[in-house]
Amino acid sequence: MPSILIVDDETIFRKGIRLMIAEMQSEWIVIEEAMDGVEALEKIEELQPDLIITDIKMPRMDGIQLQYIVKERYPHISCVVMSGYNDFQYARESLRLGAKDYLMKPFEREELYDLLSKLQEEWALEKQQNKVNVKDRQVQNQMRHHILAGLLTGSIHHAETEVLENVGILFPHPNTSCLVAKLDRDSVTDERYYRFNPTLFTVYIQQFIQESIDKSLLGHVFILHDNEVVALINHKEGESSYSEIENLTNRIRKEIRGQSNFTITFGLGSPAKDLESISKSYKEAGLALLYRLVIGGDRLFSSETIAEMKMEKLEWHSSDWNLLNQFVQEGDLANVQYQASQFVTRLCGQWHDPEIIQQQICKMLLHFYEQAVNLAVVKQWLQATDVKQVLMDIYSISSSKELIERCQKLLGDLSVCMANRKKKFVTSPVELVVRYVEEHYAESITLNMMAEIVYLSPSYLSSLFKSKQGQSFIDFLTEKRIEKAKTMLRYSDEKIQVISDSTGFTNIRHFNRVFKTLTNRTPTEYREGKNIAARQAK
């Protein structure tokens, strides 16, 4: 039986529609209700209704935004919109997005019944067709996304044109420009951004751009990463094409800003004259987008406009993050996050070159990585990732807010590791090592093992131990074992082999050699000498 999800912020209206459908005596069943687009998406993912009847004006996420996301994620689900007389322009937008129909509030029972009867017939017919086509469409969509992503990496070549055509990717015009779009993170409050899955913003942007391009240009729009939408726009040669793309981005930014109350920024690469050059256009678009760090978002950056900008070189020294370094060492999380924010904000305000901003941040992070290595807290700090991936992530960020959040997270996590490490030590690391050797000298002990116990790197522990004890860790361990062996030789009748085993030596030959080196006598000679001295004393 076909199912319906009703979405409206007015409880009375939702209940009224539900009652009318129940009294209709048709196959339609209402499986759930939602008070806005956010709640509706949760219900859709769980219940997969056949039809959504949604109001347009709602808090958190309105009906237009909901339709964009449904069209991208659940193209098999139909939508009907409800609107008041003053909202008819939004109803038209919904029809453009593929809504099956609209109902003007307040509507009569007969209007709803006629519409649902018509949709039930369409649903039955589509269901039969979908059984055959849905799997083929899924495979083709996966292939299409894989090929489009391959164009950006340069792995798809001109000789493979037939492969592109088989999945509906056509480039009839001589030039293809890569356009990259990203959400301006600072245009969305944290409360709104994290209220639901942040990737929904990307889905919404992708669908909006595709709808806009389809009106006047030929382009293929897809999501490459969770926060990055890519459009490959195929166009003719000449300056008019650039103007067209510029006008397109201006229109999209204005409409998204007005309808959804957030902003996006575009990066545009130079036109590619063949498939192999599309990857170069994509790189240029990404580099252009980086200038959002220093100029701000809600605009179009292109390789041409960036080339015209004059980059001023400023001096920056490690002393500018000494205070941040102090708070990390102290494990002061609140001050670390504040200083990290101040550091990135100052960088973005004083430097005019985004690449240098990223370099300075990476330089700062490498400083803290070196400290983490020396204190053996890298695993606790970075978990499953490594420093190379951390630095690569920094170079992929073009939003100052995202850069601040990333640095706050990284340095905040490190400060927590530092605080936890402090709690483990009531005495110095060297004292703990000395105590451990005295208690476990008979066992297998290595410098690496001691380093793990006191949360230091082996090289740093070795240097620290020698500066505190005046001898190396190995020499200290060896002397401690020989002292214990001398005591056993002096006061017991145990065999040399037993004494060797009991003091942590791996074999008796090694024990004999080390003993003679330190005492100028073999273990046997040492025992006999003590016995002679004891008899003479009597």
Image (cartoon, rainbow, N blue to C red):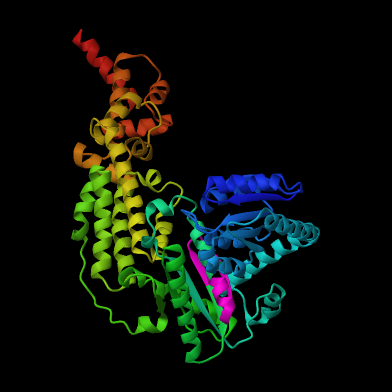
Vertical side of 513 occupied by 310: above or below: below
Residue 28 in the image: x percent, y percent? 73, 49
* Viewer-side residue, 412 vs 516: 412
Q: Is residue 65 left or right of residue 286?
A: right
* Viewer-side residue, 475 vs 422: 422
Quadrant hosting residue 451: top left
Vertical side of 282 occupied by 75: above or below: above
Residue at point 26%, 45% (across, down): 334
Residue at point 70%, 75% (across, down): 163
Vertical side of 158 occupied by 141: above or below: above
Residue 55 in the image: x percent, y percent? 56, 56
In the rendered image, the quadrant that contains the C terminus is top left
Q: Magenta residues, as a range?
A: 209-230
Residue 47 in the image: x percent, y percent? 65, 46
Residue at point 51%, 84% (across, down): 271
Quadrant hosting residue 83: bottom right
Does residue 276 appear in this view? Answer: no
- Whether residue 215 is in magenta: the answer is yes
- Whether residue 224 is in magenta: the answer is yes
Residue lying furthest bottom: 238
Residue at point 46%, 76% (across, down): 251
Residue 511 in the image: x percent, y percent? 37, 31
